[in-house]
Amino acid sequence: MSESLSDRAYQILRDRLIMLDIAPGEPINEAALVQELNIGRTPLREALKRLEVDHLVHSYPRRGTFATRVDITELAAITEVRLALEPLAADRAAALGGGSLRAQIEQTLHAITNFKGDESRRTLMENDLAVHRLIYQAAANHHMEETLIRLDNLATRIWCLTLDRLPSIEEHIAEHQALLQAVLDQDSSTASELAREHIASFESSVRAVL
């Protein structure tokens, strides 16, 4: 029971930290979260330990736990590793045709295809996170999945920090259509190349406004 509560707390706090709902540098109010999430301090602290491994929070002796600052200078290092691993994940996911996640990938592709153009930026960014996590999971390599999720989370925080200065993110999200279709078509080479282009495009768009 404690583990499932810890997982739930971890997922809720992780996404709040990624989307900057918890601002960089903001203290984590454990007492308030225990009440809000209706959990004990033990599962909450288990979740916070995992978030510290993810570089999303940092604990200081006698001071408490705080959301980490968003370090834009980390973008190059994050991109370097993503450029190596994202195409590999897309290649593996396509080789398996999405595997057990095929139906979920089809549903996600259908949803993106039917976007009306009036979606909020938050909705689009949540979709971006969901697509990347789907592909990582479909690659069926939990070590690669864990690494890529952590890097994508950090990249998304940088994206959120620069979001107001970006002219548009719709085109970036639209790139997912071809990528997901390549996975479903089991076109590994195309999926790999599209993933590489997607990451490179992301870095270029963010750097343009820094």
Image (spheres, grey):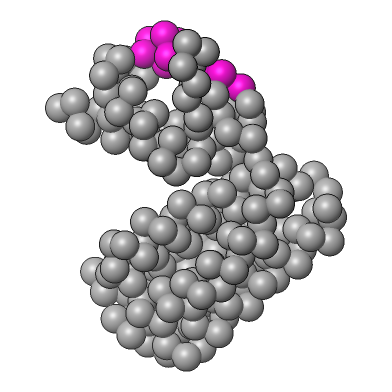
Q: Position of residue 143 (x, y in %)?
A: 31, 62
Q: In the figure, residue 50 lies in which quadrant? A: top left
Q: In the figure, residue 18 lies in which quadrant? A: top right
* Relative horizontal placement of residue 41, taking residue 21 as reference (left or right): left
User: For the point 43% across and 14% down, which residue is it?
Assistant: 30
Q: Main secondary structure of the magenta part?
A: helix
Relative to 80, does residue 63 appear above or below in the rendering?
A: above
Q: Position of residue 183 (x, y in %)?
A: 41, 80
Q: Where is residue 49 in the image (x, y as percent from the top left)?
A: 36, 31
User: For the point 50% across and 32% down, which residue is it?
Assistant: 57
- Between 117 and 181, the residue placed more toward the observer is 181
Whether residue 126 is visible, yes or no, is yes
- Between 183 and 145, the residue placed more toward the observer is 145
Q: Quick one: quadrant of the N terminus?
A: top left
Whether residue 168 is visible, yes or no, is no
Relative to 114, does residue 48 appear above or below in the rendering?
A: above
Magenta stretch?
Answer: 26-35
Name, please, the residue furthest toward the front: 61
User: For the point 51% across and 37% down, which residue is it?
Assistant: 56
Q: Position of residue 133 (x, y in %)?
A: 42, 59
* Relative horizontal placement of residue 196, taking residue 161 as reference (left or right): left
- Between 109 and 173, the residue placed more toward the observer is 173
